[in-house]
Every structure is written in C-alpha cells, then in structure tokens.
Amino acid sequence: MRNERPLPAPPLESLRKQIREVLFHPETELIYDYATSRDPVHRFDHLPAPEEVAADFPNPCGWSTGMEDSMLNAGSMLDVLRLEREDGDSPETAPAFACRLLHGIHRCATVHGHPGFVARSITPRDGKSCYSNSSRDQFTLAVYGVWRFLRAFPDAPSAEIQRARELLHSIACYCEHTVTAGHEYDLGRLDGGRAIVSKMWQCGAHEVLRLPMIYAAAFEATGDGHWRDAAREYAIPALPVTLGVSARECYWDIPTAQLQISLRFFRETDLFPELRNGLSSAMKRVTQLARPQLQRLLARALAFEGDWGAFCENWRFLPMKITPQTISPRGDTAVFDGKTYLNPCFNAAYAEPNALLRGIGNCLIAVLLDDSAALDRFEVDSLQTLLEKVNFTLCTGSGTVQLLHGCRLALHRGAEHSLSNATITQEVLHEEEFHSY
C-alpha cells in the first residue's frame, strides 16, 4: 500500500531533468555544484581554469568554485538509480547513466596518477586538472556509490563490474598506505602535503566509521579476507565512539547524513553480526538528531519567498574569507603547509534556497536510511507541498541531488513505513554552517 498522497512524479522528474541537463557534464561524466547560465554552452564557464587549479586557487579544496562536491553528487545519484530500479520505475537509460557516473568517479581516482586518491572533481576545461585536497566526505560518498552500483547493477557489462571492483580496491590500497599513524591518519594532499578535513582516524564520532567502511567495501568487491580483517580492526573500536556522537557534531545536514550512510553500510552488509545492536542504536541516535533539523528546514522552505532559480555569481568576483582551521593557534599566519585556503562567499540569493533543498534532502536521507524510523504527517505533507511549489528545472545548484535522493528513499519506504505518529523531540541545535568536509 502506497502513500495516500504519494510524492508527485512530475516534480521528481523535474529534479532528475535538472540534474541530467543542467549539472551533469557529458565529457567528464561528473555532476557539478552549480551553473551560472541557462545557456547550455556557457553554464560552466565559471569553472576553474587549469592554471587556477594548478595553483590551488582560491583554495586546495576547490570550495565554492563549482567543482567541490562532484563525488558527493555521484554517490547520491548512484543510490537514486538503485532505488528506482528496486522500485520498478527505473528509466531505460538508468544502467547507462550509472555506468557514466561510475566512469566519473573512476576518472577522479585515476586522472592524477595516484590511483585510489579520490579527487573532488575535474575541470572540464582540460578534462584532467583537479584540486590537491580531497576530504573524507568525498571518499565516503564515492565508495558508497560504487558499492551501490555493484549491488544494483549486476547485469552491467563485465568491464564495468571489473572497473567498480578495481576502484574500491585501489581506494582501500591508497588508504592503507597513506592513512597511518605516521601520517596522523590523514588522507594527505595530491602533492604530498598535509590536508585539512581529511583525518580518517582519531577523529570525530561522526567520522570514525568512514575508514572501516572503505576497507569493508573493498572486501565486498574482492572477497579478499585481508580487507575484512582491516575493516574489523577499525570498526570494532569505532562503534562505541560513534554511539557517543553529540548534537554539536551533527548540527549540520551534511555530516548527519554521511554518518547515517556509514552506519547503513555496516547494518546492511552485516559483516560483523556482533555490531548489530550497536549499529541499530547509533542509527536511532542519528535519526533523533536529524528530525529537528528536517522539521526546521521544511518550515523555512515553505516560508521562503525568494527565487528558487537564483544564480550563483562567478566566484572570482565574490568576497573571500580565510578558512578558520588554517589559522595558526597564535593567529600569526593563515598559510597551512604552504597553502592558503580562501573561500568565496556565496550570495544569499543563491545560497539560501540551495542550502534548503540540500539540507532537506540530507535530513531525509539520515531519517529514512534508519529502518526503525518513519516520517510523521507534518513532514510528509510539508514535503508534498514543497514539491508542488518549486519548479526544479529552474534551480541552478546541486541541492537538488540530495533532495532527489531523500525523496526516492521516501517513495521506496511507502506509506506503511514513511508515516508515523511518533512524537518528535525538538533539540536546540546551532545553525551556523562551516566547511567541515
């Protein structure tokens, strides 16, 4: 039995259309963060030039340049395609598009000559230049997406299956070689320097399951017991840390969703049965943290009176701020291991609606990946109203990717699982956003 008021097909189709026709680049096979023109030929003119990327300008992460989160977008879209296939309403083009997204991830993990290092994105202006600083979040979603590809598309061409398996193996090999005590458990930069937002162990409670997830995915791909042992070595001590995750760590939609993704991976693979109860408890905790965020974001979205299709300006003309974690304790330098991290500041007209869509999507992901959770009537009705209200084909940012991901999860769960009369516990969470990825 489906929802009495099912999520309408046209808005979901408009989300899919916007992602495929506005954000996806057919040559790099990547989904970029935003477009700055409705002209298909010029929509990506703002993306960094090769010389800017080579100089790690304006920052080594490519933050705010439009090629910051291609791996997050690819991972979410591969799960969308998986959900569509399982629900029996997958477009005929879905397997081919899944292979193209796989190619994009593979390109980001190989084009630079350091196999297994998952670059954030590649500029289409030369098809090969990528920024030197990735992040644990980019690795997380890339691995999750490739793992979903292997499970959802076993009928893909054998060469694509092999590509996916080798990709997960190479990422694990890179981590095993680099993420060590000697490197302070950090992914490092492509140029060998120290990275930020890339610590994979001895890190926050919402982050410690990322490394064992990478090793476990390699085991799933290869069957090599070495990777299962590596995953166990980290997963066993990581779970108690995860169970202590605080509202402060999960006050923002991005880490909240990604923590739940790593928990869902281990719960679904069930590689370590002794962790079942702890994983379930941790997922419930994440759901409790996500719910007040979801309700607050839905209320803000329904009250929003701005332009959902506003453009981001060319980042080169925006004011820039120094990334706080690169400033030395004494405050006498903001150069971090030879690099400056200047972050362009988005104009509010673009940033607010895009953040609302992304945030709602990520909070839906965090709630609906937990099989014990369900949406309440306010959440379902508010989501329905939002989908009917916005013409997503006019949106210019990639918040639509996470929104589509969350909506597909809601459809996948159906009425009997997506509705609940449970009382929602409101928590006071900070709203300030910062680059933690």
Image (spheres, rainbow, N blue to C red):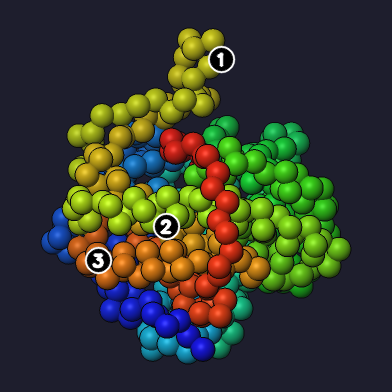
Please report whichever mark, 2 or 3, sits nearer to the chain's N-terminal start: 2
Q: CA distance from mark 2 to mark 1?
A: 35 Å
Query: Which numbered circle lies on residue 62?
Result: none
Q: Position of residue 376 (x, y in %)?
A: 50, 66
Q: Amino acid at mark 1?
A: Pro
Q: Residue at x 44, y 64 (%)?
A: 379
- Say which label, 3 or 1, has the lower sequence index: 1
In this view of the protein, can residue 166 be seen by the observer?
no
| Position in image of residue 298 (x %, y %) | 38, 56
Residue type pointed to by label 2: Ile
CA gap, disc 2 and disc 3:
15 Å
- Is there a contact, CB below 8 Å, between mark 3 and mark 1? no
Q: Amino acid at mark 3?
A: Lys
Residue 282 pos. (x, y %): 71, 55
Q: Is residue 55 left or right of residue 271?
A: left
Mark 1 element type = loop
Residue reaching furthest to the right = 274
Which residue carries the number 1 mark? 329
Front-most of 182 and 365?
A: 365
Q: Report helix, strand or loop for mark 2.
A: helix
* Residue nearest the viewer, comparing 80 with 427: 427
Mark on residue 389?
3
Would you place residue 287 above or below residue 346 in this image?
Answer: below
* Residue at the spot of label 2: 360
Of residue 264 and residue 180, the one placed in the foreground of this image is: 264
**In the image, residue 167 above or below residue 70:** below
